[in-house]
Image (cartoon, rainbow, N blue to C red):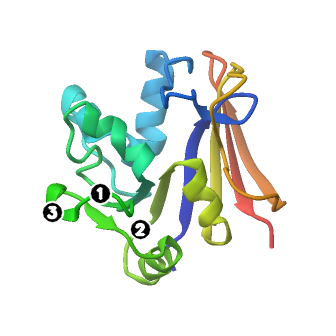
Amino acid sequence: MRPLTYLVASSLDGRIAAPDGSTDAFPFDPAYGAALAQDWGDALPTAFHTAFGTTPPGDRFDAVVMGRGTFEPALQAGVADPYAHLDTYVCSTTLDPAEHPGVTVVAADPVALVRDLKRADGTGIWLCGGGRLAATLADEIDRLVVKLNPVTLGAGRPLVDGAYDPRAWRLESTRTFEVGVVLLEYARQS
């Protein structure tokens, strides 16, 4: 079965974005960007690869699942499919699929979608966000990869936005970047 990986940036206080959805407070530098491109290139926007003349490696993910709130900033920037190199699934009951031909808009149960994707052939599935969708898919997440940023936001969109539901994760690796970001890779605890 293909694994579902929730790869996400977070503040120290567990916020994946400011209240308005922005992530401008998270630090970024070229060395950190290069490391992400090398290790997690499938999870970088297609525009990044176009701008830098790189090719998505295709070794980690071939599908991305996101909620409407995660998809909206791309639309507002005029980008119809931010991850055109992946099969893109947007979970939304309000988006009209006919208006978004480059992606698959899924109004049905996200859990059923992910279970179907897991059974299909492929490399892996990336849960791009957001926190509400992560809470809905909590039982399906196999790996949790957090890019922990050295900032606190005080308010904003939580890493997992659902009811109290403790889950145990096994730390598999850490990597610290000079910009202060710590990449934490976890696997679901059996």
- Above-or-below relation of 136 to 146: below
Q: Quadrant of the C terminus?
A: bottom right
Residue 76: quarter of image: top left
Q: Which mark is residue 6?
A: none
Mark 3 to mark 2: distance in Å? 28 Å
Binning the other alpha carbons within 10 Å of mark 3 as few (below 14), some (14 to 19) or many (20 upward) gives: few
Question: Circle 1 is placed at which residue position?
Answer: 95
Q: Tell me the residue at 62%/48% (across/down).
A: 145
Q: Nearer the viewer, mark 3 or mark 2?
A: 3
Q: Tell whether label 2 touches label 3 (CB within 8 Å).
A: no
* SS for callout 3: helix
Question: Circle 3 is placed at which residue position?
Answer: 98
Nearer the N terminus, badge 3 or badge 2? Answer: 3
Q: Tell me the residue at 45%/84% (across/down).
A: 119
- Above-or-below relation of 148 to 113: above
Q: Amino acid at mark 1?
A: Leu
Q: Amino acid at mark 2?
A: Thr
Question: Circle 2 is placed at which residue position?
Answer: 123
Q: Position of residue 5 (x, y in %)?
A: 56, 58
